[in-house]
Amino acid sequence: MKLDAVKQTFIVECSELLGDMESALLVLEKNPKDNNSINAVFRAAHTIKGSSGMFGYSGIVEFTHVMENFLEKLRQGKFEVNSDMIAALLGCGDHLSKLVSLFTNSDNYKIDDATVMRGNQLLESLTKTQPGMELKMPDKKAVVTSNNTQSQERNGVSNPYWHISLRFKKDVLRHGLDPASFINYLAEKGEIVNVATIADAVPDLEKLDAEECFLGFEISFKSESSLDEIANIFEFIADDAYITIIEPCGEVEKYQELITHLPESTERMFEVFSEMNVVTKSELGELTQKKSSPEESKVVVAEKITKEGSMDDSHEEFFSKREEQTPDEKASRTVADTAAKFIRIEAQKLDNLINLVGELVINVAKVRQLSEINGDKEIIEASLTMGRLVEEVRDSAMNIRMVQIGESFKKFERVVRDLSRQMGKQIDFKVIGAETELDKTVVEKINDPLMHLIRNSIDHGIGTPEERQKRGKKPVGTLEVNAFHDTGNIVIEISDDGEGLNKEKILKKAIEAKLARPSTSYTDDEIFSFIFEPGLSTAEKITDVSGRGVGMDVVRRNIEALRGTIDIKSEAGVGTTMRISLPLTLAIIDGFLVEIGSVAYVIPLDMVLECINISEEDEISKETGNFVNLRGEVLPYLRMRDFFNVDLTNKKIQDNIIVVRYGVHKAGLLVDRLIGEYQTVIKPLGKIFENLHGISGATILGDGNVALILDIPKLIKHAAELENVDMKKE
């Protein structure tokens, strides 16, 4: 077993389970009667406990055990959900996350006294939500038969080893537990002398469900361990298995009782015990004489269940049919069915695949170019076919890295809940378009900017219930995150129904900071853009949430680093919307290859609307500067030769205007030559070129030359700025 790989899997699964637990608790707070959410929280805690037990992390196990006891009582309807309980359970989830991180960051897992004390305080706060309630660590559920190891007595068998009988419930695998791991761990505490696998309950192949377990084990175990120590090994799987432990030289009656409770026939178990040398022939005869009749067996089983509570079902129902599952088991089954459709892939492997596909795209372009130079029709046709196949491979590889952005939005629910309560506000948080997909790398890099914008909306945008009621609004504010696709990009909008941005205050602060001139008239968009300048804040007081003027400039810089833009729409007394536009991927795109001077440039194809051809005389004769009449619409444009200072003396030029759009903005780019579509593998520029205006990256062409990728959002913004300057001159 590769422990590092197992450890990494444990960490990832715990993180996912804790995320599911938090989401379920937030849903439960809004709908206290939602049994599915209660079951989801219980399953998450139960699975974390079992997995932690396999690694021997007693601190996590003990803490989760108490949580599980509390949740079990909640599932049984012994008390009702309230906000204090949810707050306490959320705190317990945070503490579990810290315990897991201690394991992550240390080879020698150890919990300090302060952490233990904090955990105890959280558990006490949990019990205080239900006055008079006491939580105790659960008893071990193994069916043990003795308190110590004893030598062979007159009515004992001659077997000198511990005998352990295991029958696993069919859902043990769905609960994240591996039966083999417990047997392997048992081997570390002693010697497994003999083991028999009982597969009698395995159905026919056509009825076999690979997610269900039908196995049992009979084990002869040699060890100096005590009964409690052996029982502890199976403590964490006790809810998912029937366990019997018989001491060395145990009494014949104990083996007879074991056979009575097992689902297999008497003859079958006699055969197994004989082959394992658990009992001798004479002892086997004694067992046969003492074996109860079938009618008596049913009575014994019934009494065993009622009096000792050691088994949940009689042996006739041991492997029950799926249609007889409880609602909780059916919910677990649904989750398992969904999870079975996915596989977990290491992110680095996926990145390597994308890089290889990128190199393949570059080389296919080279092959196509060489085939055209060669002029062989068959080679040209083969290269075109290969190009189409590579394009399909590229799209499939990119789709693998696409994830639903709603998974990233989950963490914001907790932030909104905690901050709103901290600031005495009531906020209804809504997520729209959670199923919208985006490149995983973009999702990871956009999390921090989104978090900052949401915190700002809570702090500055939405007021307290009293403030909102004075302004004639509902006491509960609304904060909405909406994600959708638009012309090959993804748009994320963060909207609130607060008081909106105060234009006069922002402009005043900008003038004080010498970012604006008192004598100049500014549009709303220009005024709102000042909040992205370093050090500018309109907050009346500094809080631990915001107010220092640090953050919004970082937000814009991070978004622009992703080739994105951010716009603000705000109306006084109505609310504010922050609109972020981002490319779907940062790796491979469809591009449109153009030439400016003798240099090739690439424009993202999804931003190209159309191409217009104009003559040199038409352009020179224009008196409107950087404008062109596009079917009655005034379109600002950039002369790219001037923008890049290209010298074209004594060279005849055919000008083409490419109309591009990003978000709601449009502009024209005047280029010298149109080459055509081109699959573009984006290569990042080095740090020395990171501030290059109008360029967002580079790509390698089929002939080995480098083509620069135009930064369309910044070029459109530049064209709009030139338009405003010309209009002010007029």
Image (spheres, rainbow, N blue to C red):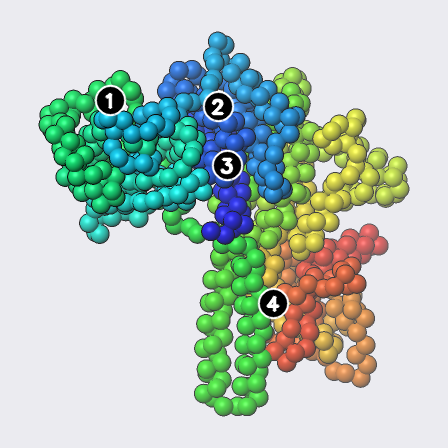
In this rendered view, identify the residue nearer to me: 8 or 185.
185
How many marks are shown on the rendered structure? 4
User: Dot 1: what SS?
Assistant: helix
Distance of label 2 from label 1 (alpha carbons) = 27 Å
Q: Nearer the viewer, mark 4 or mark 2?
A: 2
Q: Which residue is mark 1?
A: 304
Distance of label 3 from label 1 (alpha carbons) = 31 Å
How far from the left and from the top, in percent, is residue 633? 65, 58
**What residue is rendered at 67% in x and 23% in y?**
423
Q: Is residue 323 above or below residue 303?
A: below
Density class for disc 4 (Cα within 10 Å; few <14, some 14-19, many ≥20) is many
Q: Which residue is mark 4?
A: 681
Q: Is residue 54 left or right of residue 492?
A: left
Q: Which residue is mark 2?
A: 66
User: Dot 4: what SS?
Assistant: strand
Q: Which residue is mark 3?
A: 56
